[in-house]
Image (tube, grey):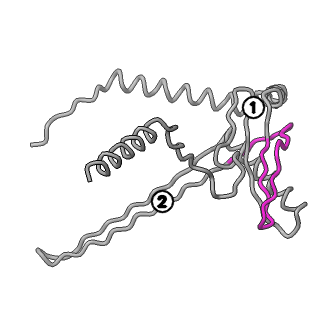
Amino acid sequence: MKKITIALLVIMVALFAMSCASAPAPVAVEQDKSGLPDFVLNPPMATDAIYGVGFAKQSTMALSIKVAETNARADIASQIETTIQEAITAYAQEAGVDENTQLISFVETITRQITDTTLSGATPKSRVPMDDGGVWVLMVYGKDALIDSFEDVAEGFERNEDAAFAEFKAAQALEKLDYQLANNPTVSQPVK
């Protein structure tokens, strides 16, 4: 009996030593199971280019590619210049007497994103057709194309008379504000 116990103990120690000496268990790497191209979830970043991602699923592959490229260009344009307009409406009304009151509350928020940019020189870098008939497109807009675009805009800019008049009126308004602040200092007094 002692021999069997000693033999089992030796085998267990040997197995334990082998398990400690074996290579560490592989670390589980989380893989993307969405089936999307890598550039969709992790768009490239660069100092010399802007990348845009677009998707479309149309009746034909050719049309899907065109629309996806358009969406990718819109993505690039929104990275260059976007105007955000937001309106928030809040309404609250309370009516009643003592403990018999009712509160009506309403909040509405509207946000609009507007992009108005001319892109010249954005090119497709990758097109990935999907099993469902859609296509993902990665577009690149290089720094040289961006600089050329701004130079074209700068050459076409002419200062007109309306802009000069608006600047003059803004300067006058600032002068009036400075005068009012200097001659009518605001003094707050506690409410009694």
Query: Going by the image, does 29 lie left or right of 179?
Result: right
Return the residue nearer the eye: 109 or 157: 109
**x then y, percent, for residue 63:** 88, 62
> What span is colored magenta in the figure?
115-139
Magenta segment: does it hold 119?
Answer: yes
Label 1, residues with CA under 10 Å away: few <14, some 14-19, many ≥20 = some
The residue beneath circle 2 is: 109
- Secondary structure beneath label 2: strand
**x then y, percent, for residue 34:** 65, 58
Q: Residue furthest bottom?
A: 100
Is 2 placed above or below 144 here? below
**Label 2 sits on what residue type?**
Thr
Query: Going by the image, does 86 lie left or right of 1?
Result: right
Residue 26, picture quadrant = top right
Q: Residue furthest left?
A: 192
Which dot, 1 or 2, sits closer to the camera? Answer: 1
* Residue at position x 70%, y 30% in the image: 46
Residue 121, picture quadrant = top right
The residue beneath circle 1 is: 49
Quadrant showing the N terminus: bottom left
Quadrant showing the C terminus: top left
Return the residue nearer the eye: 23 or 60: 23
- Secondary structure beneath label 1: strand
**Label 1 sits on what residue type?**
Ala
**x then y, percent, for residue 33:** 63, 57
Q: Determine the CA span between mark 1 and mark 2.
A: 34 Å
